[in-house]
Image: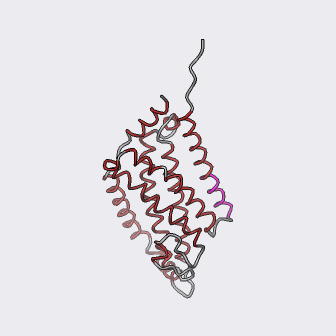
Amino acid sequence: MHASLQTSSVDELPEGSPKMLIGLLAAALAGAALAVVVLPPFVPALAQAASGESPKAYWFLARSSAFVAFVLLWLSTAAGLLMTGKLAQATLGQWLAFELHQFASLLGLAFALFHALILLGDRYINYSLAQLLLPFGSANYRPLEVGLGQLAFYMSAVIAFSFYVRRWIGTRLWRVLHFLSFAAFALALAHGIFSGTDTSAPWAQALYWAAGGSVLFLTIYRVLSVRVVPEPRVR
């Protein structure tokens, strides 16, 4: 009985709304307009960092965008686990958790794509577009570890855009696709730990432990809340 209630609450969630995509585009345009106003004083320094024999701006942007994408993926995964059950009612609420889950996943994809493409300007690694897009195609830097992140990106893309085709693929297949969320998060976590140059930093380790531990806790809670059925009281 308890498990059926959990399943029905998931089935009642709305599909991805085109309004959210419009909102994301509007936010991107607003950010671009703000950048036009704010960035000009910093352009000379950025140009100097991006030029020269060993430009570092691309590497710094790749590292920072990677952490932003990972935090957004963590938020999306955690919010997805919070969408049903008593924990959702006690924290975000079902509908707010759903909106955060969907919005964070799309925004995280944008940052992940930026994280990959900005490396085309890094002359040290010297990636090609094919190496960035093809899983395990990184010949110049840790192909296995980088390939885990590439797989996580493609899995996250399938999951994020499945919201918009749930009407055609059906709820059962949509739910099966969402099980990839756990694999995508695990692969992204492994990618960050084993290929990131900031892994040894205390703040990066704290982030990885907090994100991984919270997702593990919420996953165990979600499984137990579905499977554990209260025994009837005996007079």
Q: State the residue at coordinates (39%, 70%).
A: 36
The percent position of residue 4, horizontal first and vertical second, equals 45, 32
Q: State the residue at coordinates (54%, 59%).
A: 70
Q: State the residue at coordinates (55%, 75%).
A: 59
Query: In the figure, residue 198 lies in which quadrant?
Result: bottom right
The percent position of residue 50, horizontal first and vertical second, equals 51, 81
Looking at the rendering, the stretch of residues picked out in magenta corresponds to: 201-211
Residue 171 against residue 35 in the figure, above or below: above
Q: How many marks?
A: 0
Tell me: 4 left or right of 166. right
The percent position of residue 114, horizontal first and vertical second, equals 46, 69
The percent position of residue 203, horizontal first and vertical second, equals 65, 60
Magenta span dominant secondary structure: helix
Q: Nearer the viewer, residue 208 or 230?
A: 230
Query: In the figure, residue 146 lies in which quadrant?
Result: bottom right
In the picture, which quadrant includes the C terminus? top right
Residue 126 against residue 162 in the figure, above or below: below
Residue extending farthest top: 235
Q: Nearer the viewer, residue 184 or 121?
A: 184
Residue extending farthest bottom: 53
Color theme of the render: secondary structure
Was residue 58 drawn as part of the magenta stretch in this picture?
no
Q: State the residue at coordinates (49%, 33%).
A: 3
